[in-house]
Amino acid sequence: MSLLLPVFIFFVIAVGGAMVGMKIWLRPKEAMDRIVGSMEGIDQMPAHPSLAFLDLIKKFSKYVPQSPKDVTVMHRRLIRAGIRNENGIKILYGCKLVFGVGLCLLAVVTAGTADWESSNKVFIILAATALGFFGPNEFVRQKASRRQHQLSRGLPNALDLLVVCVESGLGLDQAILQVSKELEHAHPEISEEFGFVNLELKAGKRRVEALRNLADRSGVDDLKKLVAVLIQADRFGTGVAQSLRAHADFMRVQARQIAEEKAAKLGVKLIFPIFFCVLPSLFVIAVGPVAVKIYRELIPMMQNI
């Protein structure tokens, strides 16, 4: 009875995979198109195997349910992670299907050979399937979070350089372009974002729209504040250099306050490492020799009395 459930799950997955494969590859019209295309493009170079694998994953994406809301959220998250490929959504959903089915099959094989209870086998199979299906989402989220952290780290240096460029006589558009060039190696993330702003300005977009797109793409609060300062300075006609200087001073004070807050929390955070790591070793060093001496000399003496 314990083997019936894994065998049934394996049979369902095998039949489903066979039906999906037949639906993808056994299409007469597409087969004829491939033959005609191969005859017409004999002189063309063969595609790289990695490109063929990506095409296969993009085909799998059609079998994953996709709601417009989730697609919009994932597309925004991919952009914030720095993945701007037009097929990024398809590759992501294809990876969800491939990893979900692959880990499910691996869990079925592992559970079938192991001597576990049926409830544990079902739990492991479901957990492996969920891990494979939701793992790519978590990977993209972590990548976006790391990129936003890098943007936050590079923003103070970019702002100081932007202030220097504007105060030296450059316009705001030329200053953004210069900052993008200068920070290409030190902070490539902020350099890439400023480069996209410059490209949008060259394409004919208004400066306000390009700056708002910068804030939407990054999702960083400090960068949104900088964009708001620039938009207000452009709207009300105030000096851009003066506004940037005031915002740079504000960010410098904010960074100092954040550092002081972290330093104040350090004592509280060190309580548990000290209590569990340092104090036991000190206790062993200080009390250990005395305990050994008591065990060897005092206890036998008291027993003899």
Image: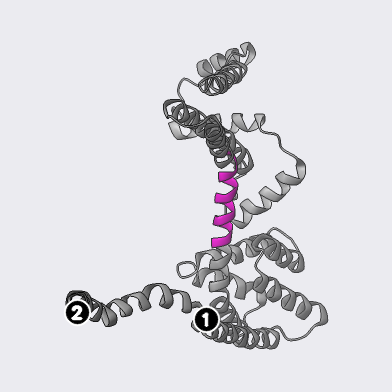
State the mark number for residue 268. Answer: 1
286 or 8: which is nearer to us?
286
Q: Residue at x 24, y 81 (%)?
A: 290
70 or 82: which is nearer to us?
70
The residue type indicated by label 1 comes to: Val
Q: Quadrant of residue 158?
A: bottom right
The residue identified by callout 2 is 305
* Range shown magenta: 133-146
The residue type indicated by label 2 comes to: Ile
- In the image, residue 4 above or below residue 186: above
Q: For residue 218: magenta?
A: no
Closer mark to the observer between disc 1 and disc 2: 2
Most extreme residue toward the right is 236
Q: x and y percent of residue 153 in the render?
A: 54, 73
Instruction: Give the distance between the C-alpha atoms of the residues marked 1 and 2, in whole angstroms.
Output: 50 Å
**Which quarter of the rendering shows the N terminus?**
top right
Task: Report helix, strand or loop for mark 1.
Answer: helix
**Which quarter of the rendering shows the C terminus?**
bottom left
The answer, for residue 190, to whether it is visible in the render is no
- In the image, residue 234 above or below residue 185: below
Q: x and y percent of residue 88 in the render?
A: 60, 43
Left or right relative to 211: residue 248: left
242 or 305: which is nearer to us?
305
Q: For residue 137: magenta?
A: yes
Q: x and y percent of residue 285 in the render?
A: 26, 79
The type of colouring in the image is one colour
Q: Residue at x 73, y 78 (%)?
A: 229
179 or 71: which is nearer to us?
71
Q: Residue at x 65, y 64 (%)?
A: 197
Within 10 angstroms of label 2, few (less than 14), some, or many (20 or more) residues? few
Within 10 angstroms of label 1, few (less than 14), some, or many (20 or more) residues? few
Q: x and y percent of residue 168 in the render?
A: 59, 86
